Image (cartoon, rainbow, N blue to C red):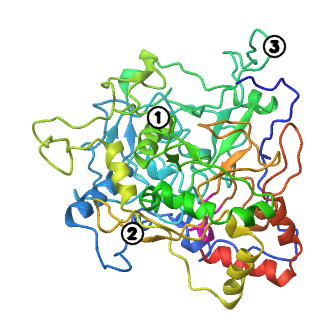
């Protein structure tokens, strides 16, 4: 597809986090307050709550089986592993986080490497680093930074782990880009257009900029002091500040991975039936929408900010490859192949285990250890329950009704149902109260990020599920605000820069016409989710 020439508007998030409401109505803030967030983990031994195990079926009472539970618990340990860059430089037995007393320790964050495969370029060195708010498996939040020299622990205030922990852990020498704020959101960065090694735009033969859109890993392993095999690594980070200056960056923040197994269990026909049932109401408000679909089998894709991934298996394999640089059976080629920086590790890094014994927790005949980390990660997500709402106040109850009456629920569909028959009885035919139609909608130039993924265009985004929004710290795809009022109003923007107006304009017009008490009620309702 031919790109726009430079000069066409290409939306980019502000690098400042909006935090002070400028309206009569006030976002109540993170439900439970800061004491209920992962940011309060300040001392070793104080544990972030584990991911919520899927609850019994509300109608049949079916529960997770013993084997499913064992896999779920193993998934927690795997997702918390701290990655090293080579096969032989894990500080403790691979896959087994332990305390100094020798027992199993699921405490997070961990400070000794107990796995390997970390790529020469990466964004994080453990899954839960970007998914810990307010529980492990949640959205992006604050963590305790690097605790200091090995064997010591120096508590530091909660903050964005991209600011002081991930860039420098184990001696890495990285520069922190200006968009990673100490108390701002965890941000993944993409370049909108391709650039050369000097950071200059590349144009095609007709003078057009060439679209990029791929994730640019923030950190390099240069300086990693726990791996003698990469002592000569001389990789450099991309020149992020130059791309910021050229307005060539687009950001994404991590959402929770809780409840994704339930979302995956919804059939396409259920998604389409719910969507088609509101066609006339949506038309009256100027709301369109369409599914993103797999280019292979045509089914509805539903995971990611642009619904670009069709399954949690795809999400897991991609996250290991893109976010941690760990090659695997789904993405077998390393994202960085510089031999001086790869370390002494086999390719792909993370695959089905074939060891004869379980000395390193990788025995082929151990049913809990046979799967690769990335596959165990997707099983963890499959049996993690969705976020649970809080009891509603009178204002929140009214807010739910108003939310529906002004048209918000036409995209944020309150509930869907999983498939009638599933391999796991606990997943089948149960309600999923996620508040999303899982469809793509055109959101106007105010939110457009100029990135296309699958069939999703540069101004299209999947309706973000709202369950758990009451405990999120940052909002919108780029984390530009931590205030729900600002996030609501940002859904509206007029046509411009080559993009049509936002499909949400009619709904936001209805919202703006509400009485202050009704606006506040909607905010109270959202924070109850």
Residue depicted at 74% across the width and 36% down the height = 450
Q: Earlier in the sequence, mark 2 or mark 1?
A: 1
212 part of magenta stretch: no
Q: Mostly what secondary structure, the magenta segment?
A: loop
How dense is the environment of label 2, judged by Cα within 10 Å: few (below 14), some, or many (20 and up)? many
Q: Position of residue 2 (x, y in %)?
A: 74, 22
- Span highlighted in magenta in the image: 464-473
**Which label sits in the foreground, 3 or 2?**
2
Q: Secondary structure at mark 3?
A: loop
Q: Which mark is residue 429?
A: 2
Residue drawn at 56 percent across, 31 percent down: 173
Say whether residue 407 is left or right of residue 327: right
Q: Residue furthest bottom?
A: 394
Number of disc labels: 3
As helix, strand or loop, the secondary structure at mark 1 comes to: loop
Circle 1 sits on which residue?
A: 296
Picture layout, residue 487 above or below residue 12: below
Which residue is the site of mark 3? 207
Is residue 423 positioned above or below 346 on the image? below
Residue 342 percent location from the top left of the image = 41, 22
């Amino acid at each position: 597809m031919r790109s726009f020439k430079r000069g066409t508007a290409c939306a980019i998030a502000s690098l400042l986090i909006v935090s002070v409401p400028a309206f009569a109505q006030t976002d109540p803030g993170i439900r439970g307050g800061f004491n209920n967030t992962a940011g309060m983990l300040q001392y070793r031994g104080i544990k972030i709550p584990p991911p919520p195990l899927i609850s019994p079926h509300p109608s049949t009472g079916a529960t997770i089986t013993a084997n499913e539970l064992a896999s779920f618990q193993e998934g927690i340990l795997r997702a918390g592993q701290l990655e090293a860059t080579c096969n032989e430089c894990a500080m403790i037995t691979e896959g087994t986080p332990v305390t100094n007393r020798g027992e199993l320790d699921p405490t997070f964050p961990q400070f000794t490497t107990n796995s390997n495969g970390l790529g020469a370029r990466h964004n994080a060195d453990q899954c839960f680093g970007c998914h810990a708010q307010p529980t492990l498996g949640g959205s992006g939040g604050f963590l305790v930074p690097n605790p200091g020299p090995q064997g010591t622990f120096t508590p530091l205030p909660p903050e964005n782990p991209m600011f002081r922990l991930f860039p420098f852990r184990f001696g890495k020498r990285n520069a922190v880009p200006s968009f990673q704020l100490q108390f701002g959101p965890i941000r993944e960065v993409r370049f909108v257009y391709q650039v050369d090694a000097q950071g200059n735009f590349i144009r095609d033969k007709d003078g057009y900029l060439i679209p990029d859109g791929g994730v640019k890993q923030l950190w390099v392993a240069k300086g990693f002091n726990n791996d003698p095999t990469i002592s000569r690594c001389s990789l450099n980070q991309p020149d992020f500040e130059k791309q910021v200056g050229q307005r060539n960056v687009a950001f994404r923040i991590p959402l929770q991975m809780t409840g994704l197994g339930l979302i995956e269990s919804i059939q396409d026909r259920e998604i389409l039936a719910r969507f088609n049932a509101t066609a006339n109401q949506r038309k009256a408000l100027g709301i369109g929408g369409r599914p993103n679909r797999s280019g292979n089998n045509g089914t509805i894709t539903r995971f990611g900010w642009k619904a670009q991934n069709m399954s949690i298996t795809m999400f897991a394999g991609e996250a290991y490859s893109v976010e941690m640089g760990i090659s695997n059976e789904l993405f077998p080629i390393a994202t960085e192949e510089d031999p001086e920086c790869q370390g002494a590790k086999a390719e792909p890094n993370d695959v089905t285990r074939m060891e004869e014994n379980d000395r390193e927790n990788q025995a082929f005949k151990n049913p809990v250890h046979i799967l690769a980390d990335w596959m165990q990660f997707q099983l963890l997500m499959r049996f993690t329950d969705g976020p649970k709402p809080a009891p509603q106040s009178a204002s929140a109850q009214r807010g739910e009704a108003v939310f529906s009456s002004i048209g918000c629920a036409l995209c944020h569909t309150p509930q869907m149902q999983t498939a009638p028959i599933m391999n796991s009885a606990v997943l089948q035919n149960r309600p999923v109260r996620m508040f999303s139609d899982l469809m793509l909608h055109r959101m106007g130039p105010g939110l457009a990020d100029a990135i296309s993924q699958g069939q999703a265009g540069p101004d299209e985004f999947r309706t973000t599920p709202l369950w758990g929004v009451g405990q999120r710290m940052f909002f919108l795809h780029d984390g530009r605000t931590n205030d729900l009022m600002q996030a609501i109003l940002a859904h509206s923007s007029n046509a411009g820069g080559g993009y049509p107006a936002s499909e949400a304009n009619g709904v936001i017009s209805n919202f703006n016409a509400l009485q202050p008490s009704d606006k506040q009620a909607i905010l109270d309702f959202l924070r109850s989710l």
